[in-house]
Image (cartoon, rainbow, N blue to C red):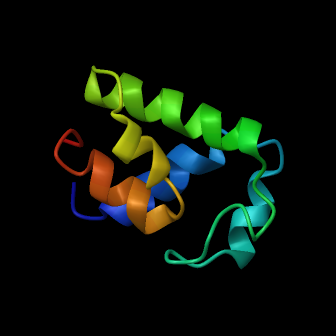
Amino acid sequence: MENVHGYARELVAACVDLPGILDSIGDDDDLVSRGVDSGEILNVALRCEQVLGRSLTDGELSRLTSISAVAELVQTAVP
């Protein structure tokens, strides 16, 4: 996929209660400090596991802090 950050943004938007919040969040902004709660981060992790077809490692889970981090994680699995 040409725009893996766009894909990651769509993935995160599908996991949050108020997807419009992402309009004010940059790719490198910390998701939690910008209003994404821990339950929503868990949903992002679960969606990443679905995309990758495997469980995330503890290190991968701890790095799910931004759109860029999600993009880096899923880039190998995105067609």
Choose between 3 and 53: the one closer to the eye. 53
Residue farthest toward the front in the current orientation of the protein: 58
Q: Quadrant of residue 60?
A: top left
The image position of residue 41, as x and y in percent, is 64, 43
Which residue occupies 24% across, 43% down? 78
Choose between 30 and 18: the one closer to the eye. 30
In-image side of 3 versus 70 (left or right):
left
What quarter of the picture does the N terminus occupy?
Answer: bottom left
Which residue occupies 44% across, 55% down? 63
Q: Quadrant of residue 3?
A: bottom left
The image position of residue 39, as x and y in percent, is 74, 36
The image position of residue 32, as x and y in percent, is 71, 61
Where 14 falls versus 1 (above or below)?
A: above
Q: Quadrant of residue 79?
A: top left
Which residue occupies 27% across, 20% down? 53
Choose between 13 and 54: the one closer to the eye. 54
Which residue occupies 39% across, 37% down? 58
